Every structure is written in structure tokens, then in C-alpha cells.
Amino acid sequence: EASLKRIKNSKYLNNFITISKELAYEQAQASEKLIKAGETRSPLEGLPVAVKDNFCTKNIRTSCASKMLENFIPTYNATVVQKLVDHGAVIVGKTNMDEFAMGSGAVDSAFGPTKNVWKTPSGHLKVNTFQGNQTKAVDAEEDWFIAGGSSGGSAAAVASGACVAALGSDTGGSTRIPAAYCGIVGLKPTYGLLSRHGLIPLVNSMDVPGILTRNVDDTTLIFNLLAGWDPKDSTTVQEDFEPIDLESDFNLRNITIGIPQEYHSPGIDAQVLNSWSSVTTLLEKLGATIVPVSLPHTKYSIACYSILNHCEVASNMARYDGIEYGLRSAEQQSTEEMFAKSRSQGLNQVVRGRVISGNYFLLSRNYENHFLQALRLRRLIANDFLNVWANGVDLLLTPVTLGEAPRFSEFTLKDNREQCATQDYCTQPANLAGCPAISIPTQLSKNGMPLGLQLLAPNFDDAI
Ligand code: GLN
């Protein structure tokens, strides 16, 4: 009840798309009985958790923040959602995001943008949904900081105290960026440790479920409940998963932390640089060995990511044809017209733009020069990380974003492509390499907004 009340009181954040009140009560009552009987299933028993709206949830609408899936109610739970439920979590609702997780600001949602809970005045969003480019429809005088995206609704839900944890997804930074902007912890686990079954795909070769919580202990708890082989996702690893134990002896004296020079990217805010160097100094004082390192192909990651992203998007979005499920346009005189009208009415400009460019890159005359080149680059970017680990580096410390959360008015001066190119500079390489990365809040900016830093580790070394 406290959680639902908090969601209601912070409605101005526009962080939830669907609130699953009845199911939440059912789950909470079941938990209550188990708690009374002393039979709790996990430390999560009875605790409120939110789920990004691109994870299928049985009997709860799953819209991907798109008009295309506005009325889609799945018949099954994504594996990670089912695991949460089986461990006693109460799913309070589905959170707002960029449409089909394409974005870095949680501003391109068919349900309107999500606001950052830090320094955002309460009041109602003046947003006309489903009106083409919704970002223009907000009253310019009512300015506020964005929550970051695409899992902005999940980050705002945790930061506003509506739930103890939320699921996000991370394809190029979508869990870590909103975590940094909202002052919470965001984990992108190693690709293949958490099941993607039931996570509506953006880029199958990079998507991972992300975990957003207020601290690292909670992240660890949830990670341990969710990780492991899933027969329904052939990309999950089959080896037995060893749960992370934060209590185990951890001595910074045995740790070498690399500072990659390429992450001093153009346009980075001086406050982020200060935070980066003061945390580096602190870690060194605590005994860690700090070494400068180089990941020379970092500068190609945005271009490489974009091409691979658009190609996989072009393939993944083909299913939304108005036939099996999703929106079907009423104006149709032929099958072709039905496809075209359903897709142009159901998908926003960002999604349609990526479908077009992805199909362009995949044309037989472009395939070699674009798609295959991008795959080769991806290998070079992944090898950069392997070289660093092979030279005795245990962790990398980098910024997450180039600055604090931008204001909505400033952010939307750029289009989605440019927004992602600046926001995701420090986050996309981890997705290309598949390695684990965590965003941890460090300090407040002069404006009183949170700043965070990112730690990256070798694949399957999430524990470190
Ligand atoms: N900003 C990137 C994109 O739009 C990453 C999004 C994500 O991680 N889901 O593709």
C-alpha cells in the first residue's frame, strides 16, 4: 500500500505506464501468509518491485511504450520476472521507457517523457500522447531534468522510493545512464548470465536485463536470484552459477584498476572529471594499483553500435505487421496497405527511421561495407578489453555520462541519433564486448544533481 501510494503521489514523474494493483495485492497477501508462517521464500518476500515495460508480464499489459503494443497482454512471464515472483517479490507495475528501448532519455515514449525526481517540481505533465513527436508537446515553461533512458521509468521508480528495485534492460547503456542521472545503482550484467526470454528484443546480441536498486547489496541480492542458465534462452551460459558473496574477503590491495584514456571524451563536464579523479585517488589510498590504459577502438563504438543496432532492429521489428498481434490499422484496402498503415501508425519516427536504415545496411550491395565491417569493428572493440585484462587489469573505472542529467528543453534540441551518440559514449563499448558494467552514484553536481561513475570487469567476473 505504501508503494502504491508513493506511485500515486509521484504521478507527475510519469514513470509508470501500468500499475498492476490487483495482482500486486494478490502477491502481497500470499507473501504476508508466508511471512506469518515463517516461510519466506527469499529476502525479497513481500517487497515491491517494478518492471520495465519491455519484459513480458503475465496478465499485465506490456506496451514497450509503443502504440503498436498499447493493448498487448502477454500470457507468460519473462524468465527474470517469473524468478522475481517465485522469490516473493510483489510486481507493482510496468515502467516507462523510450519506445522499444530506443533512446537514452526516456523522452521518446508514446506515453510521454519521464521526469527526474531530483529537483523536478511536482505538477502535471502537459503532454499530448500519440501525437507524432510528443517531445514538442510539453509546455516549454515547465522545464525539468530528464530521468535518462531508456529505463528512465525504472530508475525514477527506485529513486522516488516507490519500490526497492526495478528491472531495466541494457543494450547500449539504458540501465546505467538513468541510474547515474537518478542517483542510484544500475547493473548491466555479463551477456549470457541473465535470461532474455520474454524480454522484447531490441538488439539480441547485446540486450541484457539490467538491475536498478539503491545500493550494491540490493543489486547483489537480486542478481543472485536472477542469474543462471535458462533452457528458454540458448544464449545463457550452461555452467553452474556461483552466487556473489559480498562478505568474502575483498582487499583493494590485490586489485589493479585501469583508467582508459579514451574515455576523456570531448564535451565531458569538468565536474565528472573531478569526480573521476577524486574516486581514483581514494581507491589508490585504499590500496588499489591505478594504471593508465588504452582502449584504442573506443572512438568507433558509436558508429559500430548504430549499424549493428539498426540491422537487428530492422529484423526484430518485422514481426509488427498488424497480423499476429499489435495494432492493426483500420484504414486498409490491401495487405500491403495494412502493413504500411499499421506500422506507420503504431511505431514512432525513431523506430521507423532505424528500420529503414537497418534495411539499407543489409541490402546485398551494402552488407559487406556496413554490416560485416561493423562486426569486424565489434571484434576489435572487444579485443581492446581482452588486451587490457590480459595485462593484469582487474577493473576499469570510467564516467557513465558526460555530465549531469540535462534539462528536457536542452536535451530535445538534439534528435534521437545525436542524443544517443553523446549519452552512450561511455556505455556502449561494454555491450559490444558483453562485459559487466555498473553505474554507482558518487556525488552531487553544483546544481544538486547526482553524478555517477562506471566500473567494468572481464566477462563473467561480475562478482568483482
Ligand atoms: N541509446 C541506445 C539506443 O537507443 C541504447 C538503448 C538501450 O540500451 N536500450 O539504442
Image (spheres, helix red, strand yellow):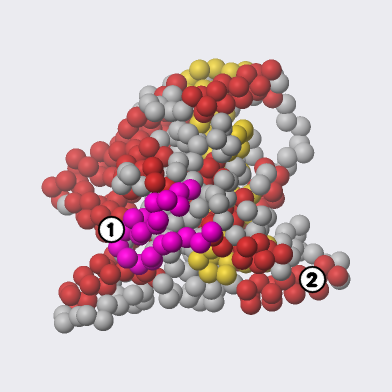
Coordinates of residue 416 in the picture (x, y in percent): 33, 48
Residue 359 appears in the picture as rendered: yes
Q: Main secondary structure of the magenta part?
A: loop
Q: Helix, strand or loop at disc 1?
A: helix
Residue 315's place in the image compared with 464, above or below, is: below
Coordinates of residue 438 in the picture (x, y in percent): 57, 40
Residue at (60% x, 42% y) in the render: 183
Coordinates of residue 269 in the picture (x, y in percent): 46, 28
Residue 252's place in the image compared with 28, above or below, is: above
Residue 131 falls inside the magenta stretch: yes
- Image quadrant for the C terminus? top right
Residue at (45% x, 33% y) in the render: 402
Residue contact between numbered discs 1 and 2, judged by CB atoms under 8 Å: no
Mark 1: amino acid:
Gln
Q: Nearer the viewer, residue 11 or 186?
A: 11
Q: Helix, strand or loop at disc 2?
A: helix
Coordinates of residue 332 in the picture (x, y in percent): 20, 80
**What range is drawn magenta here?**
123-144
What residue occupies the far right of the structure in this picture? 37
Mark 2: amino acid:
Glu
The quadrant where residue 458 appears: top right
Q: Nearer the viewer, residue 295 or 167?
A: 167
Residue at (53% x, 73% y) in the render: 60
| Crowd tier of the residue under label 1, counting other residues whose Cα lies within 10 Å: few below 14, some 14–19, many 20 or above | some
Which residue is labeled 1 in the image?
349
Q: How many marks?
A: 2
Residue at (36% x, 59% y) in the render: 137
Q: CA distance from mark 1 to mark 2?
A: 46 Å
Q: Which dot marks residue 32? A: 2
Residue 393 appears in the picture as rendered: no
